[in-house]
Image (cartoon, helix red, strand yellow):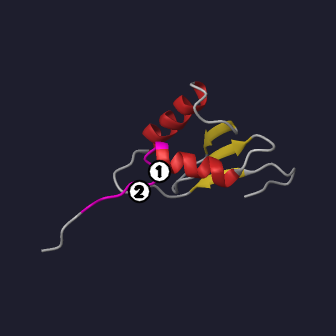
């Protein structure tokens, strides 16, 4: 979403089954630190009872591009294969 000052944020409010929030946050922080992802200027956990992880984007960053990268390189989008018998 877009904040009051025109900056974009990605807000994560749910995680795939068996994905630990702390691991996900650490994973994203590593990607930023290692300069593998561009466009993220801040990352914080605002969770209380519900999950709320906020990713602040740099101005000019394309939110969809950042989100797609996160889906591809983190556990944010996990696929489970199963058989129904």
Which numbered disc covers residue 20?
A: none
Q: Quadrant of the C terminus?
A: bottom left
Q: Please, what secondary structure does the residue beneath circle 2 have?
A: loop
Residue 36 on image: x %, y %: 57, 31
User: Which residue is the extreme one toward the right?
Assistant: 5
The mark nearer the N terminus, 1 or 2, is: 2
Tell which of 59 and 9 is nearer to you. 59
44 with respect to 51 (left or right): right
Using the numbered discs, state the Cα–Cα distance from disc 1 to disc 2 in whole angstroms. 7 Å
Tell which of 55 and 45 is nearer to you. 55
* Residue plotted at (62% across, 40% down): 44
Residue that mark 2 sits on: 16
* Magenta span of residues: 73-81
Marks 1 and 2 in Cβ contact (< 8 Å):
yes
33 with respect to 85 (left or right): right
Q: Can residue 72 be seen in this view?
A: yes
Q: Can residue 53 be seen in this view?
A: no
Q: In which quarter of the image is the N terminus?
A: bottom right
Compared with 83, 58 (above or below) is above
Which numbered disc covers residue 76?
A: 1
């Amino acid at each position: 979403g877009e904040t009051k000052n025109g900056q974009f944020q990605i807000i994560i409010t749910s995680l795939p089954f068996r994905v630990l929030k702390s691991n996900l946050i650490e994973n994203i922080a590593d990607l930023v630190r290692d300069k593998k992802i561009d466009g993220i200027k801040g990352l914080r956990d605002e969770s209380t009872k519900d999950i709320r992880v906020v990713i602040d984007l740099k101005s000019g960053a394309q939110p969809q591009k950042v989100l797609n990268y996160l889906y591809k390189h983190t556990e944010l989008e996990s696929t489970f294969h199963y058989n129904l018998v």
